[in-house]
Image (cartoon, rainbow, N blue to C red):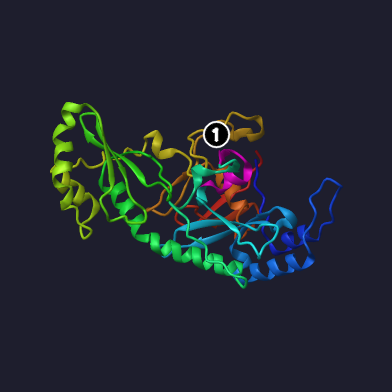
Amino acid sequence: MALQATASRESVRAAAEREPEGEGEAPRRPAAFYSSVFAQIEEVGWERLMSSKGDGGVSCLVFRVLDDQGRNHLLEITLPMNYPSIPPSLVAVYPAGLAMLLSHFSCHQWNGNARYAIYLDVPYLPKLQWSKGSRLKDVVCQFQEHLKILQDYWSIMDDIDKVLWVVDPTKPTFAMSHRRIALGDDCYLLLHVNARKPRSLPECRFLGTDGKLDRLITNWRKYRKKWSADKKFHENLSTVLDFALPPPPSVNIEDDEQVDCGICYAKHLPIDDELGTHSGGTTDYTCENPSCSRAFHSVCLRDWLRAITTTRQSFDVLFGNCPYCSDPVAVKITDR
């Protein structure tokens, strides 16, 4: 399914000015509400508005937010009917999952509502400070401050992923605080890092044959007080277990795991006549940034770029940014 950009200033205004189509359509809000929201979007920046939907196109807004390390984050802000008397609700969505979120590829029930929980972007959301005079820019600023707080947590999780033999999850999102670490001999350590106190002693469960784990469990109980907030995570873990942790195995670039699409998380596209020559196809585009090198289906990347308001089109080529590293990417528009 092709994704169309919906968050331009003109398209949002047009949606707000559209007359109700029938008796069954929900009542519209006062005109002053739309004028106020447009002004608040202007303060945040229309170029940061990724998508908009709902009543008049403004009851649910998704803004793009960059953190201090240049990571992309998407903040979904839902405005209740009595906004701004009642504060908005927030959901942070993983950027690479936006294409699926907008095209309804994968929906999960979460708290009784349709939410894309698998693509949550942060381990926990900030407690929103809201007052009578608060505006959308205040929400975005509070989220940016929250991202600053999470930088240490993400740095620690990156250290774990790079140095230790992580077998699950294979493609963690920024929200995932658990890791299953291989210890060898079919033994594993299930870690849960406290996102609020990432340098504190993590929760651990040992998985495997009891006889092989006895020494490690004993060491964990005996030496856990040696855990130090000043040490790197993997150094702490090795000290407490009194065990040389195995490094990750060398990566085989031809491994199937390395060519899964970074947007749909599958190696092959579905077998579908609507996809034409792309039906059942493998990934055919790779980000040129050496530190990223994420693979994509050109179809998925094209749909992703079409959902981004900053994407430019020149003749039959879309120019935009990689969903992971934000480096420039370009994909040709072809018929399916």
* Viewer-closest of 130 and 297: 130
> Residue 258 falls in which quadrant of the image?
top left
Amino acid on which the number 1 mark rests in the picture? Leu
User: In this rendering, does residue 169 appear at all?
Assistant: yes
Magenta stretch contains residue 101:
yes
Q: Residue 38, percent across and down?
A: 70, 67
User: In this rendering, does residue 302 appear at all?
Assistant: no
| Label 1 sits on residue | 269
Residue at image position (68%, 55%) is 6
Q: Residues within 10 Å of mark 1 (few under 14, many from 20)?
A: some
Residue at image position (55%, 30%) is 280
Residue at image position (65%, 69%) is 40
Q: Secondary structure at mark 1?
A: loop
Which image quadrant: the C terminus? top right
**11 relative to 287 in the view: left or right:** right
Numbered range of the magenta stretch: 97-110
Q: Residue 82, percent across and down?
A: 69, 60
**178 relative to 115 in the view: left or right:** left
> Residue 209 falls in which quadrant of the image?
top left
Q: Residue 203, percent across and down?
A: 29, 44
> Residue 255 falls in which quadrant of the image?
top left
Q: Residue 218, percent across and down?
A: 14, 38
242 in relation to 53, above or below: above
Magenta stretch contains residue 28:
no
* Viewer-closest of 332 and 247: 247
